[in-house]
């Protein structure tokens, strides 16, 4: 489902002495089935931008089209838009409230007025996608689960709406490494198997380097850079100036090259670095 953002400006508390321009004339296009990494320093406008994509915020000016439907026009059916564009907030597990995992994941589909058979199928599928065993967990209280499991159940609640676009605001924040890996693995799988468009807001350059097809970099409410991770991470100076880093692997490659090695400076992921270092160790390259 393609998304077009045209000249989007958003101000908080307009007309007050506290007015704050959070988005400043942002224009962007996201293609159907793309995996976008949305990065930027804290306060750069990422959360404000994604809240526009399912109609939670209304632009001060500008337009947004989803699948060629202008969702910022008057009278648009926001309920339908929210079905198509699923938004997973930071710490989504704080919104779990039902007494069983089943009921929590079923909450959205039930509100759509679906029959119980369809609801059950959706719950099963959504839990399967996030790697939670349906039979084992459906009757458990969400509050008896680990942090990573709770979050996956919360994500399943959004997936049960069968959105075409999934937006996740820092889905791994506060999780231990195991919980983090499980979430990222499941998002990647979801994108690959269901061709769903994913927008991942992240502070981890390593994660977006591994996962995203394209990065969008925000700075002070503007989209200042975009391109494939390799293209974007070439701009080391610009990124550091705006408080971002490049993937750790890039620093490792630079430091090895300073010691006389000749490793491809485009390398941004651990697996690429491993392959390059193995080649050196096998004597295929210096
Ligand atoms: N409810 C609000 N009222 C007033 N200003 C706000 C509000 N929410 C955000 N802002 C301001 O708007 C700007 C953009 O904030 P936003 O939360 O979109 O940034 P962000 O990139 O998502 O940050 P983070 O990475 O910390 O989540 C910031 O200057 C922020 O202080």
Image (cartoon, grey):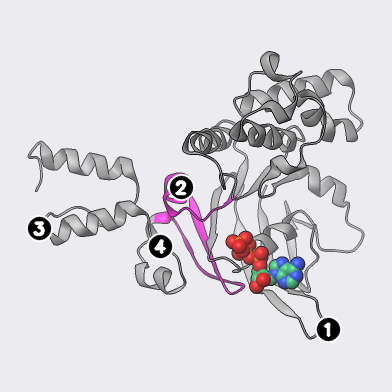
> Earlier along the polypeptide chain: callout 3 or callout 1?
1
Disc 4: which residue: 245
Disc 3: which residue: 260
Q: Of helix, strand and loop, which one carries label 2?
A: helix
Ligand 1 within 8 Å of the CB at mark 4: no
168 with respect to 248 (left or right)? right
6 with respect to 234 (left or right)? right
- Distance between the alpha carbons at the discs numbered 4 and 3: 24 Å
Decide: few, some or many residues near mark 2? Use Cα within 10 Å; few <14, some 14-19, many ≥20.
some
150 with respect to 174 (left or right)? right
> Earlier along the polypeptide chain: callout 1 or callout 4?
1
| Residue farthest bottom in this picture | 17
At 20% from the left and 58% from the top, the residue drawn is: 255
Which label was assigned to residue 207?
Answer: 2
Q: Of helix, strand and loop, which one carries label 1?
A: loop
- Distance between the alpha carbons at the discs numbered 1 and 4: 36 Å
């Amino acid at each position: 489902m393609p998304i077009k953002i045209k000249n989007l400006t958003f101000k908080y508390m307009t007309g007050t002495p506290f007015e704050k321009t959070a988005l400043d004339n942002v224009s962007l296009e996201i293609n159907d089935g793309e995996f976008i990494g949305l990065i930027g320093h804290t306060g750069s406008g990422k959360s404000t931008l994604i809240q526009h994509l399912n109609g939670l915020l209304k632009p001060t000016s500008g337009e947004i089209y989803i699948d060629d439907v202008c969702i910022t026009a008057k009278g648009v059916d926001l309920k339908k838009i929210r079905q198509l564009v699923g938004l997973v907030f930071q710490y989504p597990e704080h919104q779990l409230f039902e007494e069983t995992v089943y009921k929590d994941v079923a909450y959205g589909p039930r509100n759509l007025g679906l029959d119980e058979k369809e609801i059950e199928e959706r719950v099963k599928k959504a839990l399967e996608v996030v790697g939670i065993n349906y039979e084992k967990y459906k009757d458990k209280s969400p509050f008896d689960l680990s942090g990573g499991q709770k979050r996956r159940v919360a994500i399943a609640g959004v997936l049960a709406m069968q959105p075409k676009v999934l937006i996740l605001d820092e889905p791994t924040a506060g999780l231990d490494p195991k919980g983090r890996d499980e979430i990222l693995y499941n998002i990647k799988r979801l994108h690959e198997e269901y061709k769903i468009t994913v927008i991942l807001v992240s502070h981890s350059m390593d994660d977006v380097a591994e996962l995203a097809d394209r990065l969008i970099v925000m700075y002070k409410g503007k989209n200042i850079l975009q391109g494939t991770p390799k293209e974007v991470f070439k701009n080391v100076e610009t990124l550091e100036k705006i408080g971002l880093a490049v993937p750790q692997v890039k620093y490792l490659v630079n430091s090895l090259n300073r010691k006389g090695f000749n490793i491809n400076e485009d390398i941004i992921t651990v697996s690429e670095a491993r392959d390059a270092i193995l080649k050196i160790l096998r004597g295929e390259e210096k």
